Amino acid sequence: MQELSRDGRISNLELAERVGLSPSACLRRVQDLERAGVITGYKAVLNREAMGVGFVTYIGVGLGEHTKEAQEAFERAMQAAPEVVECHNITGTIEYLLRVECADLPSYKRFHTDILGTSPYVTGITTYVVMGSPKDMRA
């Protein structure tokens, strides 16, 4: 699992060598993991800067209402916002934690004003700007 997590494009032959299995046994294990839903897919790791993303934030969002309607409306708005790459409903003093990726500060300000600022249920917004990521295990 660790080898595939590090490199989803590794060849079956190389994977088999690294984990000490025959190529046929290794392929069967990977296929079994896919069928069991342990491996749900493979994706490319993108260079955000090369794609024009230079401003990354985590945002804590508090809602004024704790109803199902409020949560569903907020989640729909976040699904529709391309800047939101992660949206987590969490416990604690706030309801949501977002990961937002934008080109720059002015584009983040537009998101903050036009998307979060127009949501009728949002009562609190706390932004944490990512200055560096010495460890990032997201694929």
Image (cartoon, rainbow, N blue to C red):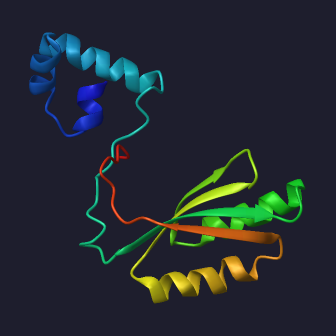
**Along the horizontal axis of the image, is 122 left or right of 116?**
right
**Along the horizontal axis of the image, is 42 left or right of 3?**
right
Give x and y (percent) for residue 135.
Answer: 32, 46
- Residue at (47% x, 89% y) in the render: 106
Give x and y (percent) for residue 19.
Answer: 17, 16
Give x and y (percent) for residue 71.
Answer: 80, 58
Q: Of residues 28 and 44, which is closer to you in this image? A: 44
The quarter of the picture where residue 61 lies is bottom right
- Residue at (83% x, 70% y) in the render: 121
**Along the horizontal axis of the image, is 98 left or right of 66?**
left
- Residue at (44% x, 35% y) in the render: 40
The quarter of the picture where residue 16 lies is top left
The quarter of the picture where residue 10 lies is top left
- Residue at (27% x, 71% y) in the render: 49
Quarter of the image with the N terminus in it: top left
Give x and y (percent) for residue 65.
Answer: 89, 62
The total of numbered circles placed on residues is 0
**Along the horizontal axis of the image, is 41 left or right of 11?**
right
Considering only vertical position in the picture, is 91 above or below 52?
A: above
Considering only vertical position in the picture, is 82 above or below 29?
A: below
